[in-house]
Amino acid sequence: MLRNIDRLSERMRGLGVTLRPHLKTCKNIEIARLMMASDAGPATVSTLSEAEAFAAAGVRDITYAVGIAPAKLDRIRGLRRQGIDITVILDSVEQARVCRDVPALIEIDSDGHRAGVRPAERERLLEIAAALGPESLRGVLTHAGGSYHAHGAEALAAAAEGERKAAVEAAGILRSAGYATLVVSVGSTPTAHFARDLSGVTEVRAGVYVFFDVMMAELGVCSYEDIAISVLATVIGQHHERGVSFIDAGWMALSRDLGFGNSGNGLVCDAEGKRLDDCRVIECSQEHGVVNRLLPLGTQIRILPNHACATAAQFAGYQTPEGSMPRVATGAW
């Protein structure tokens, strides 16, 4: 984990941009402090519960990187009254009109993957900016979600450049209309590691890089040996005719994310973390998993998750070589 953190931090320094780590993956203040430039941030979150928990732990500079709903603004304003510089994101005039007293970033669609305004939609972009007003407009933000389907270095670099160009173009349109000092925020773990040029970008957001996972390894972003999180499970039975074992970890432990479909519900390692060749969790029910190999009853195994964020969210904390590491809060995020 420490090596993963250092790898991206050094890369961002080399490219001359600020790293605003996404804390939705770790949900842990000790890990967050290792990821952030300072104990106060900057940071990214994906729920208001995360924002509130990290704010209570001393993080003061937060981007809430999910489109804002009007019903959530009272909680945003409550955090700002506490001195938390929390910024929201939006992509419509309707959202902008209710956010004139809250700093906001306009979400840009850089690859058709999710929400946002395309840079080509110049009039819509300027209409949103006008509805928001210069006092609240912080800049633009994009996320190249399509990078999670870009396999190999060239495809990942192309996704990163597409992300950069869209955000920089949108920011240029706003500057030409008189909006100054704009944040230009981009990021995903794949594009952060494969961007070759970040000219015009002010900050990069990434989160799963702290642990990595099977999907990142299959994309070529990391090696399997870089994966820093696993679920410890125990063999609780066997089916000799099928040649499989049952474990006490189902989708409540591993999540339902099947990644790219190549690794079942997760890859299997021995208790020390060494991968077992062609061994995976092939089926899951709520509390049971099925491993495609006969293993002795009581054997402990480690399962590398397809999606570290989804798997980590199932648990209240971590066990490390140094001991217990609880999350900043328990309950729903």
Image (spheres, rainbow, N blue to C red):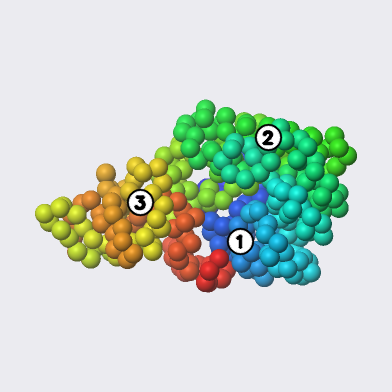
**Residue at image mark 2:** 166
* Residue 262 or residue 295, whichever sits in front: 262
Does residue 171 appear left or right of residue 180 in this picture?
Answer: left
Q: CA distance from mark 3 to mark 2?
A: 35 Å
Image location (x, y in percent) of residue 83: 78, 66
Return the residue found at the far right: 178
Label 2 amino acid?
A: Ala
At 84% from the left edge and 46% from the top edge, which residue is drawn?
130
Return the residue found at the far top: 154
Badge 3 or badge 1: first in the primary sequence: 1
Q: Residues within 10 Å of mark 2 (few under 14, many from 20)?
A: many
Whether pointer 3 and pointer 1 mark residues with C-beta atoms closer than 8 Å, the reply is no
Label 1 amino acid?
A: Thr
Does residue 214 appear left or right of residue 60 in this picture?
Answer: left
Label 3 amino acid?
A: Gly
The numbered dot on residue 32 is: none
Whether residue 202 can be seen here: no
At 61% from the left edge and 64% from the top edge, which residue is drawn?
50
Image quarter hosting the C terminus: bottom right
**Residue at image mark 1:** 47
Element marked by disc 3: loop
Badge 3 or badge 2: first in the primary sequence: 2
Whether residue 181 can be seen here: yes
* Residue 183 or residue 74, whichever sits in front: 74
